[in-house]
Amino acid sequence: MKVHLMHADADFVPSAGDRRPPSWAGDAEQDLELGFVLDAAAAGDPLVWSAVRTALLTPLTSRAAVRYRHEVLEDARDHPDAVRALYDIAGKAIAADKSVFSSVFSRRPELVLDRSLRVLALLVDVVEELRSLVAAEGDAFRSRGLQGFVRTVRTDLDDAYLAELRETLDHLARKDGLVMSAGLATGGATTEQVPRLPRVAGRSLFSHVALRKPTYSFTIPDRDEAGFEALGALRDRALVGVAGAASSAVDHVLSFFVTLRGEVAFYLGCLALAARLEELGMPVRLPEVLEPGTDTLDATGLYDPCLVLRTGEQAVATDVHAEGVRLVVVTGANHGGKSTFLRSVGVAQLLASAGAHVPARELRVSLAGQLFTHWAREEDTALEHGKLDEELARMSGIADRIEPGDLLLSNESFSSTNEAEGSEIGLQVIRALTGAGVRVVAVTHLYDLANELRTSEDPRGVYLRAPRREDGSRSYRLERGDPLPTSFARDLYEKEFGAQCERCTCTTALTS
């Protein structure tokens, strides 16, 4: 039985992001502040948190795969109660398994069989509830994912299957004792011990042959411990195959519900995140995604959802139209919204590649298999590396792993050295990456770097600027504009210290 709500031809494992995170995951989570997005999506549910995180950290690279999830998500938004009911029913199945005690010291076949039968009896009731939900709501779904799931339930968990399962459970309960057949080996040892059950018409979980009648019988005395131990060993040998089959049946049904709960968790998280952002007055929508390598970032009303979720207030949005270019450079006033914009691009990229709603009024974006971030870091407290050494080492590691079609977000990279050296390093890195097919969005205060890229148009790019009003305040809304030889750091000095910066006479002073 397959769920296939996340992928058309594969299962989704919510914990994969915890066990096998990609190499870029740690920096991206830290730099983009993804914790705020995950917490809003999960609303305290750890499974939803893991499912959304795994989806964000395993980006899809096919328009068809993203569209598949969009269809399911649209169904979930149209029928939230039905989808929540699927999640809850799957949770009941998992709880049923946990409610039946299991001990590592009780691995005798008879004990394993008894536990499996108790769990299966509980799971039958859960399957009945699932079938009732599908009967009531299944025809309303329009997505390929949920329609396929409905077909699976109706085909694989039909009336005949449940009737057979209940009958088999009744036979295996051994209310009248255990009937088995056996042969004798050399020396009188028993061999070929097989439990015998009444034949069940149609399909069967276990093979069985009817026994017509017993031939001989005997009774073990009450105080014959050795006799009871021998009889127990005899029963265990007869039940070992049946116990394994029953245990496998439990695993099969239970894995179906575990997968169902994990996959539905992602969609519940998407709905919760979208609802929270809309509650705070911010728009969300499903984006139009393009294949990797199409070099498109075309957004209207793009904003940083982490800022909105952290402050509980609306954020200023920015428009960016970069089609057919691999480079976006952001310059301008300090504290003008440049880093916030960079986070908005990163979070939107991951949400779009996961098949979720994005924080924008409109978004067309190329898919990216990996998203690397290169933010300035604090000083190395162990004093093993200088800041520039550390920056270069991280960028070298990115260069080793990044591939064509991937996205790099660079925030004040190589700002730990002087203007000339930092600009030259940045120029070589950006040209090498964009020349290899990598998209780059770079925030920088290095005027020489930004100006050289702009004037040479090698590579071609889109240039945004954080504007400064006449009174020194910021609008936080980025605009298209050529780089300026100042970041207006003097405004920050005067705001912080309440006095004019008399010693600073050059326009490029205090730019970091």
Image: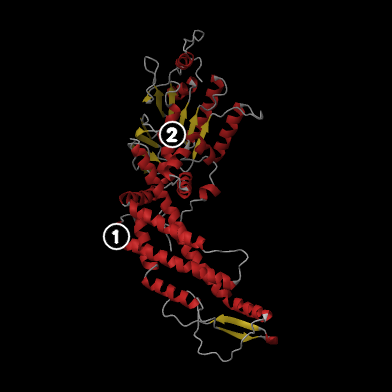
Q: Quadrant of residue 367?
A: top left
Q: How many marks?
A: 2
Q: Is residue 401 left or right of residue 464?
A: right
Q: Is residue 175 left or right of residue 154?
A: right
Residue 24 lies, in percent from the top left, at 53, 40
Q: Which mark is residue 504?
A: none
Residue picked out by circle 2: 310
Residue 102 lies, in percent from the top left, at 56, 64
Residue farthest along the left direction in this orientation? 140
Residue drawn where x is 66% and y is 85% of the image: 185
Residue 381 lies, in percent from the top left, at 64, 29
Q: Nearer the viewer, mark 2 or mark 1?
A: 2
> Callout 1: 10 Å neighbours few (<14), some, many (20+)?
few
Q: Check the image and report above or below for 395 versus 250.
A: above
Query: Which one is nearer the viewer's eye here, 295 or 130?
Result: 130
Q: Secondary structure at mark 2?
A: helix
Q: Is residue 17 left or right of residue 393?
A: left
Residue picked out by circle 1: 139
Residue 148 lies, in percent from the top left, at 36, 60
Q: Is residue 175 left or right of residue 62?
A: right
Q: Secondary structure at mark 1?
A: helix
Q: Check the image and report above or below for 408 versus 67.
A: above
Q: Is residue 243 visible?
A: yes
Rounded to the nearest angstrom, the CA distance separating label 2 from label 1 is 40 Å
Q: Quadrant of residue 233?
A: bottom right
